[in-house]
Structures are given as C-alpha cells and as structure tokens.
Image: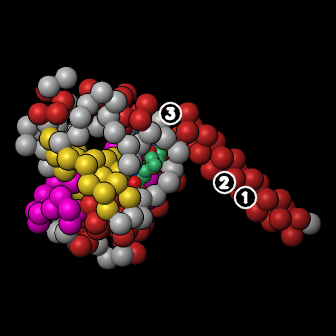
Amino acid sequence: MNIWIGILIIVAVILTAFSYAIATFFLTIMSGAPFVATRKKLIREMFDALPLEQGQVVADLGSGAGDFLLVAAKEYNATRVIGYDINPILTHWTRLRFKLHKAPITPEIHTCSFMKADLSDVDVLCLYLLTETMEKIRPIVRTLPEHAIVISHGFQFPGCVPTRTVALPHGNMHVYNMKAFQAE
Ligand SMILES: C[S@@+](CC[C@H](N)C(=O)[O-])C[C@H]1O[C@@H](n2cnc3c(N)ncnc32)[C@H](O)[C@@H]1O
C-alpha cells in the first residue's frame, strides 16, 4: 500500500513539473521570444568586437540560461551582471549555473517581465529578441544611461539604424549607442 502511495506522489510531482515547464514555455513565447541560447563562442566574439572592458555593468533583457551574464562575469570581469527573464525555470537555472561555474560574482537575476527592468546603472545591454519584441522594449532601452551601449544578437530595432553591424564567424551583432534612439 505504502509503495503505491509513493508511486502516486512521484507521478504527481513529475506531472506537475512537466505541466509547469510546458506552461512557462508557452507563456514565454506569447510574451516576447522563445528561449534559444546564444552560443558562448558568439558571445565571446561579440564581447571581443565591442570590446567589453573590465569592471562594466552588463544586463540582459530576456536573460534565458544566463550565458551572456556568465561569460561577462567569468571571462570579462564584469562588476555586476543583471538579468530579467519571465521564465522561473531559467532564472533558477541561471543562479545555479553561476554557483556550478564558481563565478566570481553573484548575478542579480529577476523573475519578471523585462518591461520592469531597472537599467539605470547599466553600461552594456545584451539582447537576443525577436524584432517585434525589440519594438516593445524601446521605452525601457531609452532609460539607459547616456554612455550605454546596446548589443543585439541577430535582430535589429525596427526603423533604428545601428551604430555598427559586425559580421562575426558565428552570427551577426548590431551595436547601438544611445544617440541612435535619440535621433528617432
Ligand atoms: C532568445 S532567448 C535569449 C536568451 C539569452 N538572452 C541568450 O541570448 O542566451 C529570449 C528570452 O527572453 C525571455 N522572455 C520572453 N519574453 C519575456 C518578457 N516579457 N520578459 C522577460 N523575459 C522574456 C524568454 O524566456 C527567453 O529566455
């Protein structure tokens, strides 16, 4: 009898976790962009081309599994890394990855919409979002400090000319300074 109760509890836990994962996956797609990670090779190429300097504050809107932030913290000595993602599985996984990789700093990871992001101290903002989502986040991006730089993997802000577009071995990077948004 006890064995059957145990099996029932395990099945219930697995089913709940599975439904939760499916629900957050569809929530994510409906709210902005599905989860696809930027490869670390491309992240390094993007940071090298920028170049990302030591001691900067790096943020990612839709931070996924935290790859941009982990590379910035571990390999480019960022002083703060800040991520926003609506999917709680990904934000928990990001925090755990920082521990597993023994990253030198603790990431500031927020489980909420990136429309609530505080970007007031950010030097470099990383993005990998669909074009229509880029359009939505424009008001948030305009709250960046004047010196900030935005780098986008693959996608562009509609109707906004990038300051620089760099073709890299593993993908394209669009770079925007804040003047690109003021000129609109
Ligand atoms: C294409 S992935 C990019 C992940 C990460 N930036 C990278 O390049 O590896 C887009 C991410 O945006 C997140 N996302 C979508 N809509 C969102 C919203 N409204 N607020 C916060 N995050 C959102 C998704 O959960 C997903 O993890």
**Circle 2 — which element?**
helix
* Labelled disc at residue 17: 2
First in sequence, mark 3 or 2: give its number: 2
Which span is picked out in magenta? 47-65
What residue would you read off at disc 3? 31
| Residue drawn at the location 18% of the way across and 30% of the way down | 181
Q: Is residue 52 visible?
A: no
Residue 183 quadrant: top left
Q: Is the CB–ligand 1 distance for label 3 below 8 Å?
A: yes
Amino acid type assigned to the residue bearing label 1 in the image: Ile
Camera-nearest label, 3 or 1: 3
Tell me the crowding category of disc 3: few under 14, some 14 to 19, or many 20 or more residues within 10 angstroms, Cα based: few
- Residues at badges 1 and 2 in contact (C-beta under 8 Å)? yes
State the separation of the CA atoms marked 1 and 2.
5 Å
What is the crowding at mark 1: few (fewer than 14 residues within 10 Å), some, or many (at least 20)? few
Task: Judge whether residue 19 can be spotted in this image.
Answer: yes
Identify residue type, mark 3. Answer: Ser
Picture mark count: 3
CB-based contact (under 8 Å), mark 3 and mark 1: no
Mark 3 secondary-structure assignment:
helix
Residue 4 picture location, percent across and down: 89, 65
